[in-house]
């Protein structure tokens, strides 16, 4: 019997995309770094950003600047940080109605709800004031617990905090960061959320049942 369901956040409960475009973007032009060079340096630090090695966004930016031999301007760093914060607030401003309805129905059925998100502090600054927060019994942000998907530890930590065994829990996410494989390795039943994804993206993930809409979750727990 399913006692708990753990959700991913980005592209599962909220989305940064609309009509194949990002809802909000921000410029790093003032850093004086070629965009491709910056993206490569940013991506190379992904794990350290997710697991809290970098204490905040500004620290990561400074590390990139130092590694490239560029001078650090605190005012520029802070301005770009604020732009990123504002961009990351946008996905929280409009939550899909069916997602809210599904969460409420799951709560009505006494299913415990947890969140497991690979994220940095500025990416989830909108969580507490969002319409999602009240439905969740526990929330795990990777930067806080110093663990990140797909490592099994973060799923096991989530189960321990909700006092459920992995075998009694589901994990639902879009599949980024190999999160479905990690959940499965930790003995949770994993499902791919595809409602925000075009087929050419969702089909890159294989081996897991796909859910085309949030309400499909209710069918799972009825089995």
Image: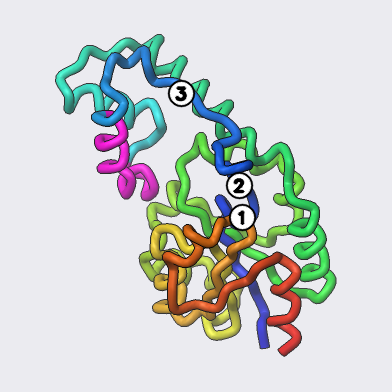
Q: Mark 2 points at which residue?
A: 15
- Residue 96: x and y in percent read 74, 51
Please say whether residue 114 is one of the residues in the magenta stretch: no
Question: In the rendered view, does 38 fall on the left or right side of 108?
Answer: left
Q: Does the magenta stretch include residue 45?
A: yes
- Mark 2 Cα-neighbour bin, 10 Å: few <14, some 14–19, many ≥20: some
Residue closer to the observer: 73 or 214: 214
> Taking 29 as reference, is 19 above or below it?
below
> Mark 1 touching mark 2, by CB under 8 A?
yes
Q: Looking at the rendering, in which quadrant would you find the N terminus?
A: bottom right
Q: Which residue is drawn at 75% across and 86% down?
A: 222
Q: Is residue 18 above or below residue 209?
A: above
Label 3 sits on residue: 81
Of the two numbered discs 1 and 2 in the rendering, the one whose residue sits closer to the viewer:
1
Prevailing secondary structure of the magenta residues = helix
User: Which of the labelled discs sits on residue 196, or is there none?
Assistant: 1
Dot placed on the residue nearer the N-terminal end, 3 or 1: 3
For mark 2, give the secondary structure. Answer: loop
Q: Which residue is drawn at 78% across and 56% down?
A: 100
Q: Residue at x 59, y 83 (%)?
A: 168
Residue 88, quarter of picture: top right
SS type, badge 1: loop
Q: Distance between the residues labelled 3 and 1?
A: 27 Å
Q: Give the range drawn in magenta.
A: 38-53
Spatial distance from mark 2 to mark 3, Cα to Cα? 20 Å
The residues tagged by marks 1 and 2 sit, at their Cα atoms, a distance apart of 7 Å
């Amino acid at each position: 019997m399913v006692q708990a369901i753990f959700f991913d956040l980005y592209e599962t409960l909220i989305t940064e995309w609309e009509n194949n475009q990002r809802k909000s973007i921000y410029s790093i032009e003032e850093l004086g770094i070629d965009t491709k060079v910056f993206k490569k340096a940013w991506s190379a630090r992904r794990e350290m950003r997710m697991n809290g090695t970098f204490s905040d966004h500004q620290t990561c930016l400074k590390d990139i600047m130092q590694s490239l031999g560029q001078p650090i301007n605190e005012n520029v760093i802070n301005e770009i940080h604020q732009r990123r914060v504002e961009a990351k607030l946008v996905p929280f401003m409009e939550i899909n109605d069916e997602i809210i309805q599904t969460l409420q129905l799951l709560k009505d059925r006494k299913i415990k709800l947890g969140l497991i998100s690979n994220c940095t502090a500025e990416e989830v600054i909108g969580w507490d004031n969002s319409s999602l927060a009240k439905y969740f019994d526990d929330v795990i942000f990777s930067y806080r617990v110093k663990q990140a998907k797909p490592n099994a530890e973060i799923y096991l930590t989530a189960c321990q905090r909700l006092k459920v065994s992995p075998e009694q829990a589901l994990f639902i996410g879009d599949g980024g960061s190999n999160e479905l494989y990690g959940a499965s390795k930790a003995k949770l039943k994993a499902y791919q959320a595809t409602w925000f994804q075009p087929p050419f993206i969702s089909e890159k993930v294989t081996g897991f049942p796909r859910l085309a809409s949030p309400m499909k979750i209710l069918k799972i727990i009825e089995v």
